[in-house]
Image (cartoon, helix red, strand yellow):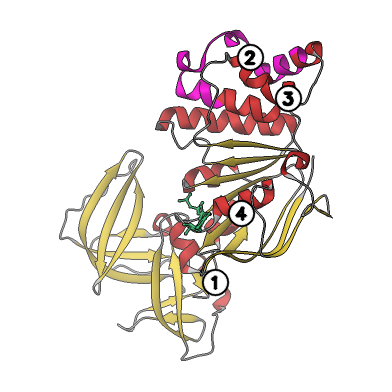
Amino acid sequence: MASVEVKNISRSFGLYKALDSVSIRFEDGGFYALLGPSGSGKTTLLRMIAGFDFPDQGQIEMNNESVEQVPLEKRNIGMVFQNYALFPNMNVFDNVAFGLSVRGLARADIRKRVGDALDLVQLAHLGARRPHQLSGGQRQRVALARAIVINPRVLLLDEPLGALDKSLRLDMQVELKRIQREIGITTIFVTHDQEEALTMSDRIGILRAGQLIEEGTPEEIYNRPRTSFAATFLGEANIFEGVWKSGALELADGNRIPLPGHVSLGSDGASGRCMVRPERIKVLTGHDQKPLNPTDTMLTGHLTRRLFSGNWTTLFVDHAGQSLRVGVPNDSPLPIAEGDALTLTWTADSAVPLRH
Ligand SMILES: Nc1ncnc2c1ncn2[C@@H]1O[C@H](COP(=O)(O)OP(=O)(O)OP(=O)(O)O)[C@@H](O)[C@H]1O
């Protein structure tokens, strides 16, 4: 297995900078998710690591050694893409064996390794089937077996579950994570799906327009994002704008949002912003509401819409022209209707100051 590190890599296509000085370390054995909008450079980054394409600037290292001069076939990297093109005229066994056959391994050796790979993806019983006789999830597992049978040092997955429907996708997430843990392989995973990134990875990198915006564990990025972009890209967020004043963000209407430890990101009077996750907000109904703690934020508003989504209901609350989202669990239904006045409150440690 291997660690991978990209250092200040840039890549332009014509005038367009698809990657702009990106540096990331992918730890040995880790599961790293690359997340970002369409066109943000995720695939371009994977292609550089695999050796399909080369950076204009910067270095790529595996186990702290430069691989720029190492051709694709010598980098020993397994790959699975969304369009996992299996050979339609070959059965499952031969599809998985292909990479080993072209490397000239002995037949007995191939049989053993393909058997092990198919066991790992729980398809040993389907070795004789052709791809068209498999379900989408089974085909995806064949693609995975084909990638890992060569004992790669790194596994690159580009939207590998993108073509699967929701429930199959959830099963495959569990399966993929189990396989990754079992073989302990360094995995770099590109996804559009924020929930997938949160549940599967040890670390997440968020790309926007070729730049790495933020990087950290799922908990770090979800609980303490540093930018509005990361806050809204990974999960739902209420973003407030105002001016810093005595360790709080003062909104245009005079309401104050105290920050944890009164730590603001600017001097008094400077403009700033902070975010509060919908599930951190509590709803108080009735009159004469008092904060539980002196540093709790209290905002009044009225309910404009409620959106039932199974475990949760999302309330849309208008406060001074801003539509705020509040997530309330459905085990304690609130006796409120659209148009009702209500008070929103949260503790100081629910507010996260943002840099921009
Ligand atoms: N060979 C190429 N020639 C010209 N432009 C390219 C080439 N490859 C990628 N690009 C451009 O570089 C940018 C980044 O593309 P990339 O495929 O890395 O994005 P992505 O984040 O993987 O997007 P998606 O989520 O849609 O797959 C895009 O604007 C794309 O059009």
In the displayed image of the protein, which residue is found farthest to the left?
Answer: 339
In-front residue for pair 219/34: 34
Mark 4 close to ligand 1, CB under 8 Å: yes
Instruction: Characterize the local packing of mark 2: few (<14), some (14-19) or many (20 or more) Cα atoms within 10 angstroms.
Output: many
101 relative to 280 in the view: left or right: right
Residue 45 — which label?
4
Q: Position of residue 257 (x, y in %)?
A: 42, 75
Viewer-nearest of discs 3 and 4? 3
Between the C-alphas of marks 1 and 4, the distance is 37 Å
Between the C-alphas of marks 3 and 4, the distance is 27 Å
Kindly identify which residue carries mark 3.
102
Between the C-alphas of marks 2 and 1, the distance is 58 Å
104 relative to 217, above or below: above
First reached walking from the N terminus: tag 3 or tag 1: 3
First reached walking from the N terminus: tag 2 or tag 1: 2
Tell me the SS state at disc 4.
helix
Q: Position of residue 190 (x, y in %)?
A: 55, 46
Kindly identify which residue carries mark 2.
93
First reached walking from the N terminus: tag 3 or tag 4: 4
139 relative to 238, above or below: above
Kindly identify which residue carries mark 1.
260
Quadrant placement of the N terminus: top right
